[in-house]
Image (cartoon, grey):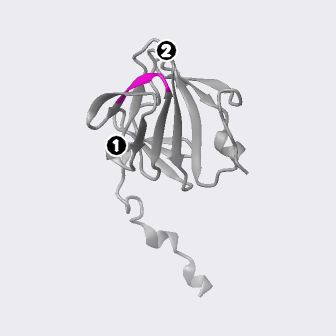
Amino acid sequence: MAKIFNENTVSFKQKLSPIPEFAWQTSERLAEIANSKHLVFDIRSLDPDKYSFPYHFHRNAEEIFVILTGRAMLRTPEGFTEVSEGDVIFFEMGPEGAHQLYNHTEVPCRYLDLRTNQGIDVCEYPDSGKINILPYQEIYKADQQADYYKGEEQIRDKWKGMEDHT
């Protein structure tokens, strides 16, 4: 069954962060309401002089913004560009798809945020060196990366007593 969402049927919830520059309003669980299996989507409203999520990219999700009303500045690895009503912006997986919005105008910028969902995603934040395991919101510092076999040196000690079971 088709689900239709618009300003009359969507309610917004204010999302605040401990850093006041990051604040936006987001629609409530549209993908869940639609019973979506592979897409996650929300309508977001970015108030004047506010930033969207921290500058980031996804390892296992593609993302599209459709600017519904207003304008904003888009930050990508290529630099800064203004986006406005009617623009459709695609972000590929990996560092090349890094992005962030800033509303440099006096009016809210509303946009559809649409992304693929394949279960687990890893979101990386180049400015702060963090890694976020989604959907669990487990956040780690990337500079703590370890060798695959670190801590595995004493494997034979873990198997002591195996002889009793053979």
Q: Amino acid at mark 1?
A: Asp
Residue hosting label 2:
107
Residue that extends furthest to the bottom in the rendered view of this protein: 166
Per the picture, the main secondary structure of the magenta-coloured stretch is strand
Residue at 40 percent across and 44 percent down: it is 91
Nearest the viewer among 56 and 28 is 28
Q: Amino acid at mark 2?
A: Val
Residue at 36 percent across and 44 percent down: it is 97
Indicate whether residue 70 is drawn in magenta: yes
Residue at 39 percent across and 50 percent down: it is 93
Q: Residue 128 sits in which quadrant?
A: top left
Residue 132, given in percent of the width and then of the height, sits at 48, 43
Residue 148, given in percent of the width and then of the height, sits at 38, 61
Residue that extends furthest to the front in the rendered view of this protein: 86
Above or below for 73 versus 149:
above
Residue hosting label 1:
143
Q: Which residues are magenta?
A: 69-74
Above or below for 25 versus 123:
above
The secondary element bearing badge 2 is classed as loop
User: Around disc 2, counting alpha carbons within 10 Å, would you say few (fewer than 14), some (14 to 19), or many (20 or more)?
Assistant: some
Residue 23, given in percent of the width and then of the height, sits at 52, 21
Nearest the viewer among 56 and 102 is 102
Taking the image as shown, residue 22 lies to the left or right of residue 76, namely right
Which of the two labelled residues, at mark 1 and mark 2, occupies the earlier sequence position?
Answer: 2
